[in-house]
Image: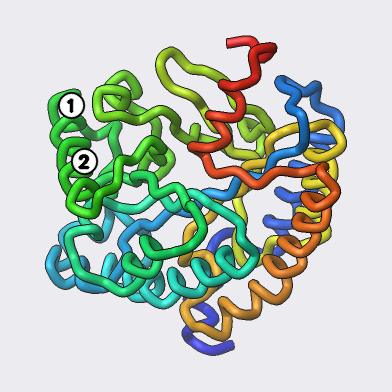
Amino acid sequence: MSASAIRDAVFLGEGSIQSLFSQAGHFMKYEFEKPKIKLDTGMLIISIDVDVGNKELGKINRGKNDTNVNRFLSEYSIGAIEELALPIFTTLFDEFEVPVTFAVRGQWLEFPNLALDYLLKSSIKHDIGAHGYTHRRFWHMSPEEAGIELAKISNAMKSHNIDPVSFVFPGNVIAHLKTLPKYGYVCYREYGDLLKDGMYIRRHNCLWDVHPSLYIEKHTNFSCVRGILDICISRKLPFHMWFHVWNFGQTQGSMQKVLKSLFYPLLRYAKLRAKSGELAFETMASAVQTVKARTDHPL
């Protein structure tokens, strides 16, 4: 095994056995769990965390922000992977005409970069949400510090004429929820794992929790995900998949391998089910609008 393959095994998600156990556990959970919501059709929501965006941030922060991003890799390394991966995944979703939520780090928006330009010029109406300003955990902040962080995000977004309404907490650590509406946020993604993941969207005070259903990484099996999507469709539930763009290896080849084994067959299958009227593609933002429009949905 090469050094790069060993590094991949260490930091890129769970190992294959643990991942298969998690996927099977999620399938059994959704197969027997009583639904908390019912929609007109099944709903597929995909959100993507952009932890750094490009390697320039690693240079500017001089390694001082590394521990806020990843336990094993530097901010520079994550940024380099994301710089390679973002155009690949944006092209993928544009090709299938599937809108997704890109939760981006505010500091990334302050640097000219082709990946951001490509995303902003996409013909698909993607939801560009926020993923912190420096990827610092919000539970380490005072209310005043959280407000400063959110104000910095707003300023960075406004420079690109973006008004974000979706928020994904760095590290999926939830804190200072009451502060989000003050800066225009309507929804967020809750913390999730095998026990806490679910297929539902619910109101949480002034915000909407677009709840996570499954974390995707390089060992994720297409058949398992298709089985969960079938449950979503048959029960008319929202299925919210999420991932980091660095979850699939450090090279274009490793990323293309996962696209071929997982994303292409999954999106082809989902498009067929959507064509028959059984499934809708939504972003975090549009999913909330759809649920809010349902007058029979309990708040």
Look at mark 2 in the image and give the residue it sits on.
154
Tell me what residue is drawn at x 54 percent, y 44 percent: 283
The location of residue 245, given as percent across then percent down, is 47, 64
Closer to the camera, 275 or 283? 275
Tell me what residue is drawn at x 17 percent, y 29 percent: 147
Quarter residue 83 falls in: bottom left
Tell me what residue is drawn at x 70 percent, y 43 percent: 280
Q: Which type of secondary structure does the marked residue at label 2 adopt?
A: helix
The location of residue 29, given as percent across then percent down, is 78, 34
The amino acid marked with disc number 1 is: Ser
Tell me what residue is drawn at x 78 percent, y 47 percent: 229
Residue 276 lies left or right of residue 66; in this view the side is right
Look at mark 1 in the image and give the residue it sits on.
142
**Which residue is outermost to the front?**
123
| Between discs 2 and 1, the one toward the N terminus | 1
The amino acid marked with disc number 2 is: Ser
